[in-house]
Image (tube, grey):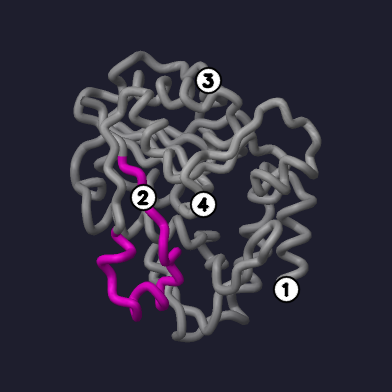
Amino acid sequence: MKLLVSLATRIIPRKYLHYVAHFFLRIISIFYRGNQFEDPITGITYRKLLPYGRLHSRANALAPDSMSLERHRLMWLYLKMKTNFFSAPLKVLHIAPEYCFIRRFKKMSNLDYTTADLESPWADVKMDINAIPFDENTFDVVFCNHVLEHIPDDVHAMRQIYRVLKPGGWAILQVPQRYEMEKTDEDISITDPKERERRFLQADHFRLYGRDYAERLRSAGFEVEENHLVKELSPDLVKRYALPKDEILYIVHKK
């Protein structure tokens, strides 16, 4: 299964992979049920989760029913524990929407929820993040995760998100990051797919972020909170939910 997942994520374009994978994974899920792990998004429990990863497969990473990964489950817990997302009337823009969230957020009566992407089959709006087609001060909340590493001018994209946020609005902007690196490793002149994959983890990435990511966000105008929710949770809960043990959540605010 580990080899199959690794090959699928490397060979099949993501827009097609996401479109068909959930049908296959719901069948697979039947054979993974148990009580060792729990997906907090669905409440479904498993004896183990699926491996996931392009270069290095991570054990117990993917919950088959929701298709959530470690970072998605952490984000869900943050929204539940630290925000009014599930109760307040909010206008939300979700860029490159993750499958595990879409239907749940669309069913929430308190949300005016719009998904947007250039390729995703689930997007309400076909949109280039470099030219977001909404007026300034439109949204209370924006989600944009694991997108900015694909953009040559990531700070410009950050400023676009800042522009469409309302004053007092907030966003979650996660990226692939190496916390041991002080500076972001980037080079938009690299065109060789193998070299990009070696340097930046994927052939379609322009950079791999370091600890200076918060400063890049601030340069776009945001106030930045580096949230360490996973450190507040008990080790048993981190293990049960299969959370990323060191992940920092970047919560940005428009002044």
Q: Percent from the top left, x then y, of residue 194?
A: 80, 44
| Mark 2: secondary structure | strand
Q: CA distance from mark 2 to mark 1?
A: 30 Å
Q: CA distance from mark 2 to mark 3?
A: 23 Å
| Residue type for callout 4 | Arg
Report if the CB atoms under discs 2 and 4 are less than 8 Å apart. no
Q: Which residue in the structure is indicated by mark 1?
A: 1
Q: Is residue 209 left or right of residue 205?
A: left
Q: Please, what is the three-letter code of the amino acid marked with disc 2?
A: Leu
Tags 1 and 4 touching, CB below 8 Å: no
Q: Which residues are magenta?
A: 229-251
Marks 2 and 4, Cα distance to the nearest angstrom?
13 Å
Say what amino acid the circle numbered 3 marks. Asn
Local SS, label 1 = loop
Task: Count every numbered label the image shows and give the total.
Answer: 4
Which residue reaches farthest top? Answer: 135
Which label lies toward us, 1 or 3? 3
The first of marks 1 and 4 along the sequence is 1
The C terminus: image quadrant: top left
Percent position of residue 64, x then y: 57, 67
Q: Which residue is mark 4?
A: 178
Whichever of callouts 1 and 3 sits on the residue coming sooner in the sequence is 1
Quadrant in the picture for residue 52: bottom right
Q: From the viewer's perspective, is the residue at label 2 or at label 1 nearer?
A: 2
The tag earlier along the polypeptide, 2 or 1, is 1
Residue position for label 3:
130
Asked if residue 112 shows in the view, the reply is no
